[in-house]
Amino acid sequence: MTLNLVYPALALIFWIFVIGLVLMKRRRDAFISGAVKPDQVNVSTEAYPVPARLASANFSNQFESPVIFFALIMLALEVKATSHLITMLAWLYVASRVVHSLIHLGPNKLPVRGAVYGVGFLALFGMWLGIVLQIV
């Protein structure tokens, strides 16, 4: 089995763990600083300060379009669509997720974040197209 598509999948999984740690730290900081009390967030997370809410939103983002990515990785491996182009697109998608997160958790400039998201989504579409072309 070729591992060229396993590495970007593992990299994205690692990145999701990193975002989870950022989320835990920001929520912990909110409790320690007294910005929020447990009874304020036991039903809704709206009472958290903005940095914690941004981390929460970004963590949730890691379970949206990445689901398509992981499905495409498995399909690509199954049908042996593991070309250099598919691998490059997979890495491009992972890079776009990392940059998207850094923007989301940092300056949160929506136009830039949206453009980076678009690049990643185009990479996913390219992966899908490459797999389709492999099997037809």
Image: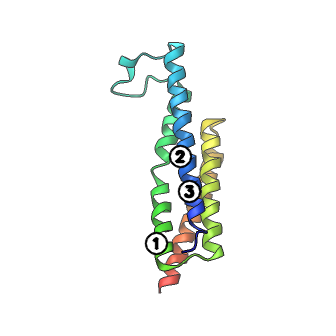
Judging by the rendered image, the residue that carries numbered circle 3 is: 10
Q: Give above or below for 94 relative to 22.
A: below
Q: Give above or below for 118 relative to 89.
A: above
Q: Residues within 10 Å of mark 1 (few under 14, many from 20)?
A: some
- In the rendering, which numbered label is found on residue 45? none
Judging by the rendered image, the residue that carries numbered circle 2 is: 16
Q: Residues within 10 Å of mark 2 (few under 14, many from 20)?
A: many
Measure how far apart labels 1 and 3 are at the Cα level.
Answer: 16 Å
Q: Which one is earlier in the sequence, the residue at label 1 or at label 3? A: 3
The quarter of the rendered structure image containing the N terminus is bottom right
Q: Nearer the viewer, mark 3 or mark 2?
A: 3
Q: Position of residue 133 (x, y in %)?
A: 52, 82
Q: Which one is earlier in the sequence, the residue at label 3 or at label 2? A: 3
Q: Position of residue 15 (x, y in %)?
A: 58, 47
State the scheme by which the image is colored.
rainbow
Whether residue 107 sits left or right of residue 43 in the image: it is right
> In this rendering, does residue 122 appear at all?
no
> In this rendering, does residue 103 appear at all?
yes
Measure how far apart labels 3 and 2 are at the Cα level.
Answer: 10 Å
Q: Which one is earlier in the sequence, the residue at label 2 or at label 1? A: 2
Whether residue 81 sits left or right of residue 103 in the image: it is left
Q: Residue at x 61, y 47 (%)?
A: 100
Q: Give above or below for 68 relative to 80.
A: above
| Amino acid at dot 2 | Ile
Judging by the rendered image, the residue that carries numbered circle 1 is: 75
Which element is circle 1 on?
helix
Which element is circle 2 on?
helix
